[in-house]
């Protein structure tokens, strides 16, 4: 009986189809209520030591980044890793990058709001 020979072209096409299928059919976005709960949790933790405006900006940014990077399963794995302290290099890098990016965005937002308030008061 003739066996099909798997050529590089066929394997590439198969990988493309599997990749396309897994990204479109299996992608399970993080539910909105989970994102909202994550933001609330973030803000509660943040507001223990920071001002509400800063925490709102930081947590909104972080949740947007989670939503862009992770599907629901990957987000749950990320949360579990964060809770356990056993974090993959990729998630550690993402976490550090998120902290830096969101801190810069929050600082810019707060400065812009302060400038607006200063203009109104003048």
Image: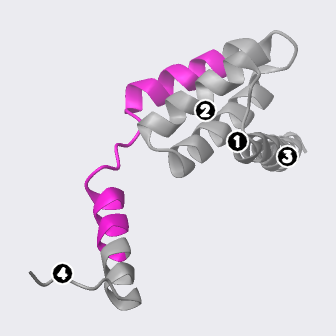
User: Magenta segment, which residues?
Assistant: 16-42
* Residue at which label 1 appears: 91
User: Which of the two labelled residues, at mark 2 and mark 1, occupies the earlier sequence position?
Assistant: 2
Task: Locate the C terminus and report the quarter of the image it occupies.
Answer: top right
Real-space CA distance between mark 3 and mark 4, rounded to the nearest whole angstrom: 54 Å
Against 115, residue 72 (above or below) is: above
In the structure shown, which secondary structural element does the residue marked by tag 4 occupy? loop
Real-space CA distance between mark 2 and mark 3, rounded to the nearest whole angstrom: 18 Å
Closest to the observer, 13 or 59:
13
* Residue at which label 4 appears: 3
Against 14, residue 91 (above or below) is: above
Q: Position of residue 76 (x, y in %)?
A: 51, 28
Q: Which is closer to the viewer, label 4 or label 2?
A: 4
Q: Which is closer to the viewer, label 1 or label 3?
A: 1
User: Which of the two labelled residues, at mark 4 and mark 1, occupies the earlier sequence position?
Assistant: 4
Closest to the observer, 104 or 73:
73
- Which numbered disc covers residue 78? 2
Determine the image quadrant of residue 34. Answer: top left
Instruction: Tell me, yes or no, whether the two marked residues, 4 and 1, touch with CB atoms within 8 Å.
Output: no
- Which numbered disc covers residue 100? 3
């Amino acid at each position: 009986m003739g066996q099909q020979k798997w050529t590089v072209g066929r394997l590439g096409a198969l990988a493309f189809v599997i990749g396309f299928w897994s990204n479109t059919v299996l992608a399970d976005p993080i539910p909105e209520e989970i994102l909202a709960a994550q933001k609330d949790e973030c803000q509660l933790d943040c507001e223990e030591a920071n001002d509400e405006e800063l925490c709102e900006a930081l947590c909104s940014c972080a949740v947007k980044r989670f939503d862009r990077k992770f599907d629901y399963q990957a987000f749950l794995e990320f949360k579990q890793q964060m809770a356990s302290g056993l974090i993959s290099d990729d998630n550690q890098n993402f976490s550090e990058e998120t902290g830096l990016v969101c801190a810069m965005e929050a600082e810019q937002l707060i400065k812009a709001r302060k400038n607006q308030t200063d203009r109104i008061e003048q």
